Image (cartoon, rainbow, N blue to C red):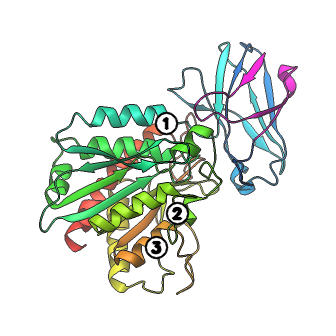
Amino acid sequence: MKISSQFDGGSIEVVSCESPDNIQVKIPKDNQSEFYQWFYFRLSGVEEQACTIKFLDLEKSAYPAGWKDYRAVASYDREHWFRVPTEFDGDTLTITHTPGLNSVYYAYFAPYSTERVSDFIASLQHSPLVDTQVLGETLDGQDMDLLTIGEPGEGKKVCWVIGRQHPGETMASWWMEGFLERLLDDSDPISREALAKAVFYVVPNMNPDGSRRGHLRTNACGANLNREWQTPSMERSPEVFVVREKMQQTGVDFCLDVHGDEALPYNFIAGAEGNPSWSERQADLQKQFTDALKIASPDFQTEYGYPLDAPGEANMTVCTNYMADAFDCLAMTLEMPFKDTVDSPDEEEGWSPDRCRRLGEANLNAILSVIPNL
């Protein structure tokens, strides 16, 4: 019996792995950070053995409330991920599972490796609608990739879509697959109309270093990129610095930042209502977008989400708040669950890669609905 995590996105610390019925592990902290919640590892040599895996010391993890009613995902082939029985007592998370094969992978959510990101970007550049550009390098020397979809032109709106600022929120990468594949489908009337009216700038992975290192929330030096937008630097947050520099060149009419939430079992939007500059126009545009997304995807809802910031009290280092203020644009954060959706549960897979893709596709309807008014 063996546990390993020395692969792209892997993360676990073995405490004890001597008996299948009492495996004990801990989740490592992000480098130079106190955040820990993401896990991804392989357990081998356990075919048809009843395994009990205990994750210790989770009371001090990044989001302890995220473990309540949570079920871990498992896979034999790293393509199909399914939920396994999981319990949480306030400090210890326990997975009980009898693997059907000799090698099984467990993760916080279906992983999405940096290699898969690279393969996906490489496949998209065959489209005549796509221009690929490297904006700069991360602290670990990885490329910061930008995709330009469609042709800029007079009267066209400028739409930015970014994902995976927090690397453990892999649902953002699965969402990107659905969104981009539909946007590039020339037989889809929604995508054709959107590209006739707008140009899209897309950063599929804002945090390659954290993704490869198996971090939950930070980049290579422990910076939470979604708190770096007001004063990014090449020394601490080059990922935000180079993207923001490009945004200043293109201008921004629309910005969607795609994330995952540990605790809430819903898909929802977080806006910039707490900004000092928040306007009735932005409020109307956001409602138009969310109303359209509810129609396009019953998996999306507006009843539950984050508490609204008090007027003028927004954290302006957050991407959505910074963008809405700096560009006077419609800027939003889309959140998806690590758990399942309460309103439309799936017992086998929970909130899953395929459902993320479908929500990504549906977002194009909502974007098209607001483009004329941006």
Nearer to the camera, 212 or 120: 212
Residue closest to the eye, 214 or 181: 214
Which residue is at the front of the view, 281 or 112? 112
At which x and y percent is residue 29?
Answer: 74, 47
Q: Is residue 84 left or right of residue 231?
A: right
Task: Say if the magenta span includes residue 342.
Answer: no
Q: Quadrant of residue 328?
A: bottom left
Q: Residue at x 50, y 67 (%)?
A: 229
Of tags 3 and 2, the one toward the viewer is 2
Residue 310 % position (x, y): 57, 84
* Mark 2 neighbour class, 10 Å CA radius: few under 14, some 14 to 19, many 20 or more: some
Residue picked out by circle 2: 233
Give, as a single range, the part of the protein colored magenta: 1-27
The mark found on residue 132 in the picture is none
Inspect the image, locate mark 1, and give the three-letter code of the amino acid beneath it: Thr
Q: Quadrant of the rendered structure where residue 73 is?
A: top right
Q: Residues within 10 Å of mark 3 (few under 14, many from 20)?
A: many
Mark 1 Cα within 10 Å, few/some/many (few <14, many 20+)?
many
Residue occupying the point 42% across, 85% down: 277
182 versus 306 height, above or below: above
Residue 99 located left or right of residue 182: right
Q: Is residue 126 above or below residue 246?
A: above
Mark 1: which secondary structure? Answer: helix
Residue of label 1? 114
Instruction: Tell me which amino acid carries mark 2.
Output: Ser
What is the x, y in percent for residue 152? 17, 59
Which quadrant: the N terminus? Answer: top right
Residue highlighted by disc 3: 322
Above or below residue 80? Residue 314 is: below
